[in-house]
Image (tube, rainbow, N blue to C red):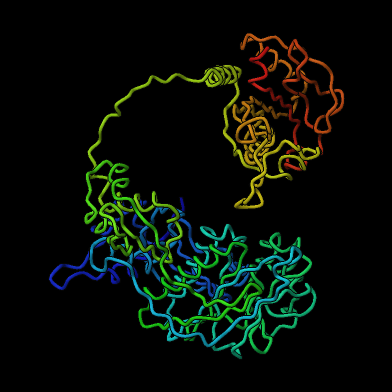
């Protein structure tokens, strides 16, 4: 779950209570939040810094110290100390929040949540939208495979009053939504611009050739001729462009958002234009969200504009007309989603005898609108447009349970008991760990998710077609499930190469393989792997370990010479069961593989299928 730094001085004033009640204190807030599913990690004193180049604001602990460079624009604060500004101290609540609730990642959304729960402003919030004055025309080519980013939703926000805290809130909200909803900008990305820098009332969202035009991306000096870059140049030369180039690199045309006079606002989902930067003097926002998933795009915009309204009640949110190939629409659409809830099902699920009136009151305290649905045990629930997590009646039941209070539920024993037993493979895995520990190896646990370059490229082998691929990976480093434990072991050796040699590591863990015969289309297989690094480590050393291991496991194997591109020729062997099944490999790792990991000493490894051994 994400850790969100919630500034106390922005949150507490927005939780208004009755005149006769004392204002909520920090201690009161810290006690209340866990009841809402928001775990409080700590109250931290932070120091605020700002990048004077792009405006990004950082909260840093005393132990962390000031940032060395800007993660947004790449400014090097060591080379140019004047690029880093000091904004003074700040007290924050470090909250462990559910990623499915990005609508409470900022002080505006969190204060709305708390006010509703406390009954200060229960029920469905209403937000008034002004009529659209700006329209955006969407290029049909953005629906083609060579330039696919078809969905866009926009809004205008007027009468904005900004300071360093609100600018930080807007930027942090963008980044959090990019992560929580946008899958690191793939499904949705957000742009916020100074509307006063834009011209005309008809904007264009087009697919353009990568070398068609030039503009100055955010963070580069606006008056430097070298700052003018083509879209392709941004992906190659700009730090943010390099980080997100994989989102556009497969395309022959890139998305571009321009105003009525052709001035560039941004190249979604990569970067905004420097000319449209939001500053302290900005009084009007133009906001866009573009992406691959329509629901995600619209939910992200709803969260942004409603959170801004909660933070700055005096702002005016104005609609924008989107003229898309599939028809015209007005965004944002803040109409609530209607769902029907069975009161009896809610009561039975929670385990408390609740009546329809009680359930309605609890749902209203969670920010929903509720009315009777023409039946004593049915309620019509109006879910706010910023709630991305409510997709099924069971999600409403969860809200009822939170509002009722999990601490108020009476624990009961289940009526039927069963006695569990460990799976045989788990018992054998425990035995394997004891054996390897007895042989002088240290156990490690590496990540199950990896990537093709890490799993195959560094090992000089072709990608395994049996590898399970992640459909929507959160990063380029986690695109497949591992099919071998050895890359993780060598990565661990590389991380620890500053320590004394020799080093002996092992891991017992699962690998995943595509298997059409299983119910899920994939299966897990338990492996044991070991790696030895040292000045005089060779094949004989790992062979001795393998022989000792299979002897202690009380299994029989047959060792035969083998060829493998990851190992030194004539110093690699395959391990077979008596019935001829290959169950493992051992040998000395090829020097080119070691170079890819930055290792300068010989490494010998072995890997065995624990399940394959047990079938002998």
Image height of 319 relative to 397, above or below: below
Instruction: Please provide percent x and percent y for residue 455.
Output: 71, 40
Residue sitting at x 34%, y 60%: 380
Residue sitting at x 46%, y 54%: 99
Q: Given the current orientation, which residue lies at the most extreme front position? A: 374
Q: Quadrant of residue 514?
A: top right
Residue 461 placement, left or right of 534? right
The reply to whether residue 257 is in sight is: no
Residue 37 placement, left or right of 594? left
Q: Given the current orientation, which residue lies at the most extreme left position? A: 20
Image height of 550 relative to 400, above or below: above
Q: Quadrant of residue 558?
A: top right
Instruction: Please provide percent x and percent y for residue 277.
Output: 57, 80
In which quadrant will I find the C terminus? Answer: top right
Residue 603 placement, left or right of 328? right
Q: Is 479 in front, or is 386?
A: 386
Q: Quadrant of residue 483?
A: top right
Instruction: Please provide percent x and percent y for residue 52.
Output: 55, 76
Image height of 573 relative to 222, above or below: above
Q: Is 460 in front, or is 333?
A: 333
Q: How many marks?
A: 0
Instruction: Please provide percent x and percent y for residue 561.
Output: 84, 19
Residue sitting at x 76%, y 65%: 146
The reply to whether residue 246 is in sight is: yes
Q: Is 274 in front, or is 497?
A: 274
């Amino acid at each position: 779950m994400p850790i969100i730094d919630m500034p106390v001085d922005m949150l507490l004033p927005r939780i208004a209570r009755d005149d006769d009640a004392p204002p909520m204190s920090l201690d009161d807030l810290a006690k209340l939040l866990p009841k809402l599913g928001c775990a409080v990690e700590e109250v931290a004193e932070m120091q605020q810094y700002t990048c004077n180049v792009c405006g990004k604001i950082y909260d840093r602990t005393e132990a962390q110290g000031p940032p060395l460079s800007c993660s947004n624009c790449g400014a090097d604060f060591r080379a140019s100390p004047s690029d880093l500004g000091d904004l003074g101290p700040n007290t924050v609540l470090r909250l462990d929040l559910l990623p499915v609730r990005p609508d409470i990642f900022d002080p505006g959304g969190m204060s709305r949540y708390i006010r509703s729960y406390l009954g200060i402003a229960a029920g469905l919030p209403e937000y008034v939208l002004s009529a659209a004055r700006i329209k955006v025309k969407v290029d049909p080519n953005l629906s083609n495979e060579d330039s696919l980013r078809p969905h866009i939703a926009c809004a205008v926000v007027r009468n904005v009053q900004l300071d360093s805290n609100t600018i930080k809130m807007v930027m942090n909200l963008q980044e959090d939504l990019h992560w929580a909803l946008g899958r690191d900008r793939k499904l949705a990305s957000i742009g916020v611009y100074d509307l006063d820098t834009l011209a005309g009332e008809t904007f264009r969202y087009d697919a353009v050739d990568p070398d068609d035009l030039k503009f100055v991306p955010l963070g580069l000096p606006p008056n430097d001729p070298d700052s003018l870059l083509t879209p392709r140049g941004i992906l190659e030369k700009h730090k943010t462009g390099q980080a997100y180039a994989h989102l556009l690199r497969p395309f022959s045309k890139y998305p571009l958002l321009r105003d009525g006079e052709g001035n560039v606002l941004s190249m979604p989902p990569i970067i905004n234009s420097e000319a449209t930067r939001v500053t302290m003097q900005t009084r009007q926002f133009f906001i866009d969200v573009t992406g691959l998933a329509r629901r995600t795009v619209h939910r992200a915009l709803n969260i942004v504009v409603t959170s801004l309204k909660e933070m700055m009640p005096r702002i005016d949110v104005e609609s924008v007309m989107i003229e898309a190939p599939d028809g015209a629409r007005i965004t944002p659409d803040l109409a609530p989603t209607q769902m029907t809830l069975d009161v009896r099902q809610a009561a039975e699920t929670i385990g408390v005898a609740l009546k329809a009136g009680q359930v309605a009151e609890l749902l209203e305290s969670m920010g929903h609108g509720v009315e009777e649905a023409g039946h004593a045990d049915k309620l019509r629930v109006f879910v706010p447009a910023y709630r991305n997590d409510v997709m099924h009646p069971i999600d409403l039941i969860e809200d009822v349970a939170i509002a009722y209070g999990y601490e108020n539920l009476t624990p009961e024993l289940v009526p039927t008991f069963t006695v569990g037993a460990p799976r045989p493979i788990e018992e054998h895995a425990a035995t394997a760990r004891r054996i390897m520990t007895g042989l002088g190896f240290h156990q490690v646990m590496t990540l199950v998710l990896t990537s093709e370059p890490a799993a195959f490229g560094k090992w000089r082998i072709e990608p395994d077609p049996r590898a399970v691929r992640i459909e929507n990976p959160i990063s380029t480093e986690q695109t497949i499930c591992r099919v071998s434990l050895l890359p993780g072991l060598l990565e661990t050796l590389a991380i620890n190469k500053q320590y004394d040699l020799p080093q002996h590591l092992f891991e017992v863990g699962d690998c995943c393989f595509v298997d059409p015969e299983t119910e899920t289309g994939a299966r897990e297989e338990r492996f044991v792997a070991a790696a030895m690094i040292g000045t005089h480590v060779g094949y004989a050393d790992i062979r001795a370990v393998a022989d000792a291991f299979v002897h202690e496991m009380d299994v029989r194997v047959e060792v035969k010479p083998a060829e493998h591109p990851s190992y030194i020729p004539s110093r690699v062997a395959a391990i077979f069961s008596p019935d001829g099944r290959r169950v493992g490999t051992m040998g000395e790792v090829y020097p080119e593989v070691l170079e890819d990991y930055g290792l300068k000493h010989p490494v010998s490894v072995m890997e065995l299928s624990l399940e394959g051994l047990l079938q002998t």
